[in-house]
Each structure stands twice: as structure tokens, then as C-alpha cells.
Image: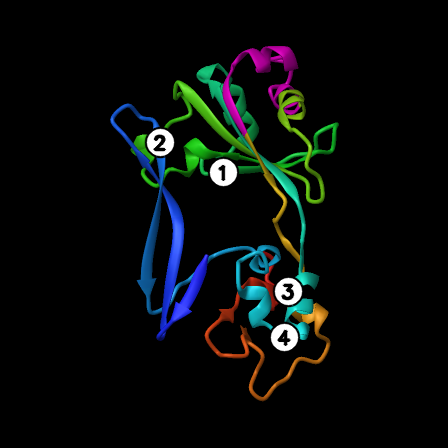
């Protein structure tokens, strides 16, 4: 929540503080700043208190019309038993991403996180744990675990059945990206935006609020 007074912005929010017992407590705070930068997807901009009243009807229409795709992203951690067959599927040792065609048509690609470490000495294909990040296909918010097990079984060329792959899973986490890739940017909403001055951002009527982001252009992300 923000409120302006005498040229400053007062910010009220909540932060979490962890104690020695590892439990978290929430505490309110209030600070004053000359300016505040809030990083947030375009669809959520209008949810910030005060933003709606600061913009014109045309500006509100633009922000409401910007659209993003959806997809599922999951992290899966397996025991090292699957690393050899996974390494054969990835073939090149420098390869970290693998585009796949699973029979469920839910997975777009698999990223081998262990191989993305900056320093080679910190990872190897024989690590005790294999960390994979799975990106689902755009436009869908389906769980990917079962499809991944069948895909890894296929990549292992019969070494592991889907059920055997599942037994090697240590942990998994799923994130539903309801705001993913940009599919309708601002320039698709406004066919002929003003050029003088260039409409590179949205400025509130009082000039104190500026809204800008990748939704202004044809950026993919």
C-alpha cells in the first residue's frame, strides 16, 4: 500500500522474520521513500491500491487487455541411479536442455540443473542427486510428474520402467505460472500509439506513477 505526502511515498507492508526456532513471524513496517519500484506482472498492476484512480480510462483499458500465456513448471529431484541413462539421452556433456515429445503431449523440454552450475568441479553426472526442471507446454496447467516418469523411461531405452523412475524420485515441486509468456502486448492493443512523445511507458495524470515493462513491446518473455 502506498500513500504520497509532501513529495515522498509512504510504504506500508509486511515482512517475515525467522527466529532461532526457524519459525516465521510477520511484522508490519512503514517507511518513506522518494520513489518506489514495484516489479509485478501487468495483469496485477491494477490491483495495487491507488493505481486504478491514477490512470485514465484508456490506460486502464490497455493494462486490462494485455494477456499472458500459462504453463506449468516443475522441479524433480531423483537419486543418482538414473544419471547414466539420462547422460546418454542428453548425449553431449555440455547439453543442459532437451526438447522432448512425450506421449501425453504435456512436456516441452527438460532442463538438467546439475549441468547448469557455473563451475564444472561442482557437478558431475554421477552426483548422488539429479535435479531436473520440467517446462510444460504453453496454455496448460497440468501436473507433469506422471508424464515425466514415462518420458524418462522412454529415454532410458528400457533400463527403467515408469514405476521404477518414480521410485527414484526424492522430492518434487510444482509452480503454476498463470502469468507466463506474453501473447498480447500493449502495441497489439493500441494500433496507432502516439509518437510525440513516444508512448514508451504509461504515466499517471499527476506524473507520479510510471508503469513500464516487457508488455510494451513484442518481447517473448
- Place of residue 173 in the rendered image (x, y in percent of width and height, measured from the top left): 53, 28
Q: Distance between the residues labelled 2 and 3?
A: 35 Å
Q: How far apart are marks 1 and 2 (CA)?
A: 40 Å
* Number of numbered discs visible in the structure rendering: 4
- Place of residue 179 in the rendered image (x, y in percent of width and height, measured from the top left): 61, 49
The answer to whether residue 181 is left or right of residue 207 is right
Sequence-earlier tag: 4 or 2: 2
- Residues at discs 1 and 2 in contact (Cβ within 8 Å): no
Residue at 28 percent across and 23 percent down: it is 21
Neighbour tally class for label 4: few under 14, some 14-19, many 20 plus, Cα within 10 Å: few
Residue at 67 percent across and 25 percent down: it is 147
Mark 2, mark 3: which one is toward the viewer? 2
Residue at 49 percent across and 38 percent down: it is 95
Neighbour tally class for label 1: few under 14, some 14-19, many 20 plus, Cα within 10 Å: few
**Residue found at the far bottom of this picture:** 196
- Place of residue 45 in the rendered image (x, y in percent of width and height, measured from the top left): 56, 59
Q: How far apart are marks 4 and 1 (CA)?
A: 49 Å
**Residue at which label 4 appears:** 56
Q: Which mark, residue 63?
A: 3
Which region of the structure is painted magenta?
Answer: 151-173
Sequence-earlier tag: 1 or 2: 2
**Residue at which label 2 appears:** 24
Sequence-earlier tag: 3 or 1: 3
Q: What element carries label 1?
A: loop
Amino acid at each position: 500500500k502506498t500513500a504520497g505526502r509532501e513529495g515522498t511515498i509512504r510504504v506500508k507492508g509486511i515482512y517475515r522474520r525467522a527466529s532461532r526456532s526457524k519459525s516465521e513471524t510477520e511484522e508490519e513496517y512503514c517507511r518513506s521513500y522518494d520513489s518506489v519500484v514495484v516489479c509485478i506482472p501487468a495483469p496485477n498492476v491494477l490491483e495495487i491500491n491507488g493505481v486504478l484512480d491514477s490512470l485514465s480510462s484508456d490506460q486502464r483499458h490497455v493494462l486490462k487487455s494485455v494477456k499472458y500465456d500459462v504453463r506449468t513448471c516443475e522441479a524433480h529431484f531423483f537419486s543418482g541411479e538414473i544419471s547414466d541413462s539420462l547422460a546418454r539421452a542428453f548425449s553431449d556433456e555440455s547439453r543442459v536442455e532437451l526438447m522432448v515429445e512425450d506421449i501425453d503431449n504435456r512436456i516441452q523440454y527438460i532442463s538438467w540443473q546439475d549441468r547448469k552450475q557455473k563451475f564444472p568441479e561442482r557437478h558431475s553426472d554421477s552426483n548422488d542427486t539429479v535435479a531436473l526442471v520440467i517446462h510444460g507446454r504453453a496454455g496448460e496447467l497440468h501436473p507433469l510428474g506422471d508424464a515425466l516418469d514415462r518420458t524418462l523411461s522412454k529415454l532410458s531405452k528400457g533400463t527403467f520402467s515408469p514405476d521404477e523412475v518414480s521410485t527414484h524420485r526424492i522430492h518434487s515441486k510444482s509452480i503454476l505460472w498463470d502469468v507466463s509468456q506474453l501473447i498480447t502486448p500493449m502495441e497489439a492493443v493500441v494500433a496507432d500509439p502516439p509518437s510525440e512523445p513516444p508512448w514508451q511507458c504509461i504515466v499517471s495524470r499527476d506524473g507520479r506513477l510510471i508503469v513500464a515493462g516487457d508488455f510494451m513491446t513484442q518481447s517473448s518473455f
